[in-house]
Image: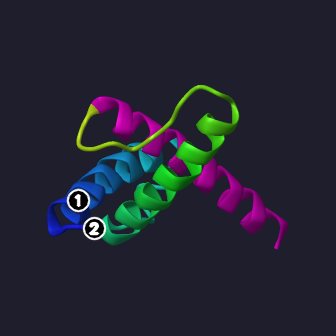
Amino acid sequence: MDPINIIVWIIVGAIAGWLASIVMKTNRSQGLVTDIIVGILGGFIGGFVLSALNIGGAVTGLNLSSILVAFIGAVILLFILRALRGRG
């Protein structure tokens, strides 16, 4: 993986994580680094879920479809984390 791809993943992760934190109302408790991590993990989760549903779902670069896939996965991740924290 070249440095440009890493930068693209960070940018897509930051945007998707930030948008997901707004939707899930966790943006007050999350910082930029957490948004990036949630967004990057969301890219993997979103890609897996959408591929399993035969919808597609690859993060292919800095484009709207990649941000949407990562956003969907980030929302799923934040939902799961919220559910786990609520049980404890």
Residue 75 shows in this picture: no
- In the rendered image, which residue does mark 1 sit on? 5
Crowding near the residue tagged with mark 1, few <14, some 14–19, many ≥20 C-alpha atoms within 10 Å: few
Range of the magenta residues? 64-88
Q: Are marks 1 and 2 in contact (CB under 8 Å)?
A: yes
Relative image position of residue 64 (x, y in whole percent) = 30, 31
**Residue at the front extreme of this rendering:** 1
Q: Secondary structure at mark 1?
A: helix
Residue at image point 50% right, 36% down: 57
Relative vertical location of residue 13 with respect to residue 60 in this rendering, above or below: below
Dominant secondary structure of the residues highlighted in magenta in the image: helix
Considering depth in this image, is 77 or 86 the residue closer to the camera? 77
Relative image position of residue 29 (x, y in whole percent) = 45, 65
Q: Secondary structure at mark 2?
A: loop
- In the rendered image, which residue does mark 2 sit on? 1
Relative vertical location of residue 54 with respect to residue 7 in this rendering, above or below: above
Q: Nearer the viewer, mark 1 or mark 2?
A: 2
Residue at image point 53% right, 30% down: 56
Gap in angstroms between the C-alphas marked 1 and 2: 6 Å
Question: How many numbered marks, from 0 up?
Answer: 2
Q: Quadrant of residue 14?
A: bottom left
Q: Amino acid at mark 1?
A: Asn
Residue 43 on the magenta segment: no
Crowding near the residue tagged with mark 2, few <14, some 14–19, many ≥20 C-alpha atoms within 10 Å: few
